[in-house]
């Protein structure tokens, strides 16, 4: 499975590798001695193999320890691997100018290694087909002994699909009630690096991340609780899944968007009218009942159904009840005061009736 192509690579290296060897500089000043030094005599240089004390530990996650940098004169290019599953891989491990090694090599997983007496070695793969790759570059140095450097590696795969729906609900919503949106993300790796954002139109409602540390593709559902208002009638809800893979990752980061979910929000009935209404003589009542579905509206006065006047006069003053039936049934009461006279500009000001009386008195004189 995973290593099928490598024995050939190894054979090719054995055939051609030594022919490209670089001359080593032996008169460069030796770096300070380290306590980790092993005597070179324990490593027969004509049989380059992984020293028994050099164990393959899983790659160190996070920044490399400073100590490792000081004592291991190895450079990897790229310094960390972020590769899409199925894509090719090439990482160059090289000895820095000051170093001098007997053997330089790559050990990948438990079962593959490749060595050279050159100052660099490129590990290549035609297709990355492991979700949990552990690759280590190691060197047996002439003076300092052995050292190794883990290659931080992330194998990723963007989601196959992203979809949005409601939990246990379909059809219109009612304003003010609780609902749960769910965003289903199929087959994404690594899910820890996924950020899911819920949107209402162009407005981000919230971001979520997974706790799952599985490196293989997983499907996960993210949820968001909402309480729609009447302004949300007609908006579109959707979600977006973004894989954020850091500076070595693809730019821009892979993003998959869900379909758009059209929200229908039932609301009302709401009466758009002050409960103490002042109407100018000759005008109609400026009252409106809003709601979805469209409510039926019946006006009552003294228990009788009444038609609203197109041109009100003083007789229309009094207490009205408005019976509305839409999403729910609601009764409203409105006390109507009819203001007589012309020339009034603002029926809500208490000074106006006084002014009207004053003007009328002047006209009577
Ligand atoms: C690997 O890196 C070394 C040092 O930077 C460089 O000399 C060499 O050409 C590189 N090899 C490849 C194949 O990129
Ligand atoms: C993530 O972990 C926190 C704390 O352990 C927990 O409360 C939360 O429910 C977890 N989230 C998911 C999506 O599992
Ligand atoms: C993945 O996410 C973690 C934090 O969740 C971050 O530290 C890491 O850098 C990310 N991976 C990559 C390759 O950037
Ligand atoms: C509203 O008023 C109508 C007419 O007076 C009455 O029949 C109905 O029961 C009232 N409804 C409510 C919810 O109060």
Image (spheres, helix red, strand yellow):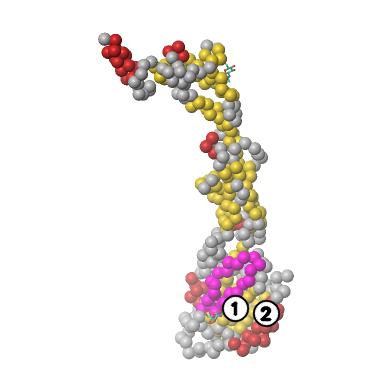
Q: Which residues are magenta?
A: 73-94
- Per the rendering, the mark at residue 9 is 2
Residue 183, visible in the rendered structure: no
* Residue at point 56%, 15% (across, down): 305
- Beta carbon at label 1 within 8 Å of ligand 1: yes
Between 226 and 79, the residue placed more toward the observer is: 226
Question: Residue 354 is drawn in which quadrant?
Answer: top left
Q: Is residue 163 left or right of residue 98?
A: right
Between 64 and 125, the residue placed more toward the observer is: 125
- Per the rendering, the mark at residue 122 is 1
Q: CA distance from mark 1 to mark 2?
A: 11 Å
* Residue 358, image x, y percentages: 29, 14
Based on the picture, tell me whether residue 286 belongs to the magenta stretch. Answer: no
The N terminus, quarter of image: bottom right
Question: Residue 345 is drawn in which quadrant?
Answer: top left
* Residue 21, image x, y percentages: 58, 87
């Amino acid at each position: 499975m995973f290593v099928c192509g490598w024995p050939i690579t190894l054979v090719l290296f054995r055939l051609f590798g030594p022919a490209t060897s670089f001359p080593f500089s032996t008169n460069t000043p030796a770096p300070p001695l380290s306590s980790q030094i092993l005597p070179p005599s324990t490593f027969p240089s004509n049989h380059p193999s992984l020293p028994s004390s050099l164990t393959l530990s899983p790659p160190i996650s996070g920044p490399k320890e400073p100590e490792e940098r000081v004592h291991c004169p190895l450079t990897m290019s790229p310094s960390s691997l972020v590769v899409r599953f199925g894509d090719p891989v090439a990482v160059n491990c090289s000895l820095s100018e000051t170093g001098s090694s007997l053997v330089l090599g790559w050990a990948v997983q438990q079962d593959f290694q490749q060595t050279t007496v050159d100052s660099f070695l490129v590990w290549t793969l035609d297709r990355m087909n492991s979700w949990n790759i552990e690759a280590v570059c190691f060197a047996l140095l002439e003076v300092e002994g052995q050292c190794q450097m883990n290659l931080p590696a992330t194998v990723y795969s963007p989601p196959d699909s992203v979809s949005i729906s409601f939990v246990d609900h379909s059809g219109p919503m009612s304003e003010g009630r609780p609902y749960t949106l769910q965003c289903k993300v199929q087959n994404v790796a690594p899910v820890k690096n996924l950020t899911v954002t819920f949107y209402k139109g162009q407005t981000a409602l919230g971001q979520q991340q997974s706790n799952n540390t599985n490196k293989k593709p997983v499907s996960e559902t993210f949820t968001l609780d909402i309480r729609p208002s009447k302004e949300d009638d007609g908006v579109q809800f959707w979600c977006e899944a973004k894989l954020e893979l850091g500076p070595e990752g693809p730019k821009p980061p892979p993003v998959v968007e869900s379909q758009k979910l059209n929200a229908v929000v039932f609301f009302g009935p709401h009466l758009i009218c002050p409960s103490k209404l002042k109407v100018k003589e000759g005008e109609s009542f400026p009252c409106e009942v809003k709601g979805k579905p469209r409510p039926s509206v019946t006006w009552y006065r003294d228990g009788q159904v009444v038609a609203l006047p197109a041109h009100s006069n003083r007789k229309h003053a009094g207490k009205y009840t408005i019976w509305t039936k839409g999403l729910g049934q609601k009764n409203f009461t409105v006390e109507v005061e009819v203001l007589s006279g012309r020339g009034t500009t603002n029926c809500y000001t208490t000074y106006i009736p006084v002014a009207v009386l004053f003007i009328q008195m002047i006209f009577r004189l």
